[in-house]
Amino acid sequence: MEVTHIHLLLNHIPILGSIFGVLLLIVGMVIKNQSIEITGTATLLLACAMTLPVYFSGEEAEHAVESMAVVSEFELEEHEEHAELSLWLMMVSGVSALFSLIAYARAPHLVSKTRIATAILGGLGFITLIPLANHGGKIMHQELREGDANDAQPTDEAEKQESSIG
């Protein structure tokens, strides 16, 4: 399996895991069920941990597709720019989730603060993943780019020549 496959296989885990983790954590807090809170926090931690292989496989995935005719260079660059912000927010969320899990076991007096911080940071992390995923999908899928002003500009020399001829 190539690194590009790894990137495509794993990139949904941080997105889905972070929203499910945050939602479980919030539900657990609302209904005052510590087991659900811990499950949500652990789910968020796993999603944050999976962000690392997704991020680090992205560079090689970029090199594998950047020369393809169907690839949007604009979307590729936008995806790359969003990836760094998402990585940092997900890592901060993961550290917060780890602290929360430790607090459940060793410092119950800190749980109320750490779980709220974890829910907020996890939610922010998820929010940054939305445009990241949007641009990622548009890299190869031209049907998603139709109607975008950015797609109207030719991305390589062949398309520039074609548009000047016809």
Image: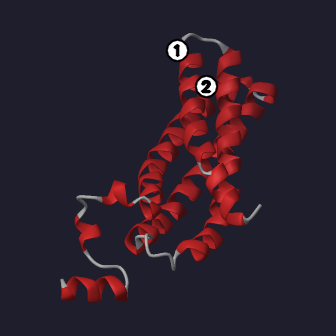
Q: Which mark is residue 88?
A: none
In front of the other: 161 or 150 = 161
| Amino acid type, label 1 | Val
**Residue 21 at x, y = what percent?**
60, 31
Q: Secondary structure at mark 2?
A: helix
**Residue 37 at x, y = what percent?**
65, 22
Residue under pointer 1: 30
Looking at this rendering, what residue extends furthest in the right direction?
106
User: How are the colours assigned in the image?
Assistant: secondary structure
Question: Which callout, 2 or 1, points at the residue further toward the start of the chain?
Answer: 1
Q: Secondary structure at mark 1?
A: helix
Residue under pointer 2: 112
Q: Residues within 10 Å of mark 2 (few under 14, many from 20)?
A: few
Relative side of 36 to 79, left or right: right
Relative height, residue 5 to residue 12 (above, below): below
**In which quadrant will I find the N terminus?**
bottom right
Q: Residue at x 55, y 72 (%)?
A: 65
Q: Residue at x 53, y 23 (%)?
A: 26
Q: Label 2 to label 1, Cα distance in Å?
A: 12 Å
In front of the other: 16 or 68 = 68
Q: Residue at x 61, y 66 (%)?
A: 58
Question: Visible in this render: residue 116?
Answer: no
**Residue 116 at x, y = what percent?**
55, 31
